[in-house]
Image (cartoon, rainbow, N blue to C red):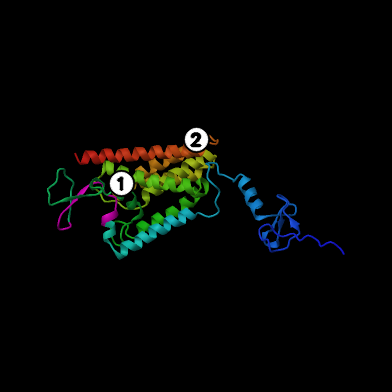
Amino acid sequence: MEPESAVTTCYRHPKVESYVRCTRCDRYICPDCMREAAVGHQCVECVKEGARSIRQARTAFGGRITTAPVVTYVLIGLNILAYLGELVRPAIVDRFSMLGAALRGPDGGHYLWQYPYPPELHAEGVAGGQWERLLTGAFLHLPPMQGTFGILHIVMNMVSLWNVGRVVEAQLGRVRYITLYLLSALGGSVLVLLIAPGTHTVGASGAIFGLGAAYYVMARRLGADMSTVNRYMTGLLLWLVVSAGLTSWQGHLGGLLAGGVVTLAYAYVPRGPRRGLLQAAACAALLVLLVLLTVGKVTELTG
């Protein structure tokens, strides 16, 4: 009588017969667990382990290479959703626009800031504890028939965000990009608070000016042909001057400066294992500075 042959089974599926071994760990694997390898097949776990050991490609600024500008899509979507919310409920603009300090009366009217103020009035804006306005104003835009631009306000900003944002995101990666965007928006709001605290401002322009500064710094760092970049920056700076009489130039300038500082840190921090940590530290330092400036101005306004 011939001896019965031993039956081998997949190590992940013990009830499935298998006669193929993983070329890496030498365990038996069934067809469902087989993954094509350079030679033979590997199991699922070995493929995952191999993927973790492969160094992922990075851009010159340390960001992971991405195939689609997902963050830019999300930012445009959030701005559009906020705009639709404004159309349904216009009071959103009044409540969440960037405002440093003002007074509201029992009749709902707005009054210029003074401190101390009469008991029948109450403070609103950042000085009134509404710190969220420092960022929410960057996602709101002028209503369709209001101001100089109306609906063109959001249209021009979203077109600019698409044109510049996807280029910057591709170079910085998603985490660095969203950090740049938010710090630029915050920088614009803080400069509005410092210079024109009684002014209501809305729009993504401050953040977009920050992306414009990033575009310029990155091009210089990469040694790109600066002719096109210089024309773009000339137009951006010209608009900064023209906008002084039409929109909030303080928000534009604040975003430009903040975006430039962040991208300089991204571009010129020495490469090495601590590059990401140093870049994060530079962004944290800017955030602390902006918070301190905000606290200082609010303290000044509230005596």
Q: Is residue 133 left or right of residue 41?
A: left
Nearest to the observer: residue 154 or residue 283: 283
Give the tally of numbered discs: 2
Q: Residue furthest front?
A: 1
Marks 2 & 1, CB-CB < 8 Å contact: no
Occupied quadrant, residue 13:
bottom right
Q: Where 180 sits versus 43, above or below?
A: above
Q: Is residue 146 left or right of residue 264?
A: left
Q: Is residue 103 magenta?
A: yes
> For mark 1, what is the residue?
244
- Amino acid type at circle 1 is Ala
Percent across and percent down for residue 185 are 37, 47
- SS assignment for the magenta stretch, majority: loop
In the picture, the quarter occupied by the C terminus is top left
Q: Residues within 10 Å of mark 1 (few under 14, many from 20)?
A: few
Nearest to the observer: residue 189 or residue 278: 278
Q: Where 260 sits versus 66, above or below?
A: above
The residue located at (37%, 40%) in the rendering is: 287
Q: Is residue 200 left or right of residue 70?
A: left
The part of the chain drawn in magenta is 94-108
Percent across and percent down for residue 21 are 74, 55
Residue 119's disc is none
> For mark 2, what is the residue?
269
Percent across and percent down for residue 139 are 36, 54
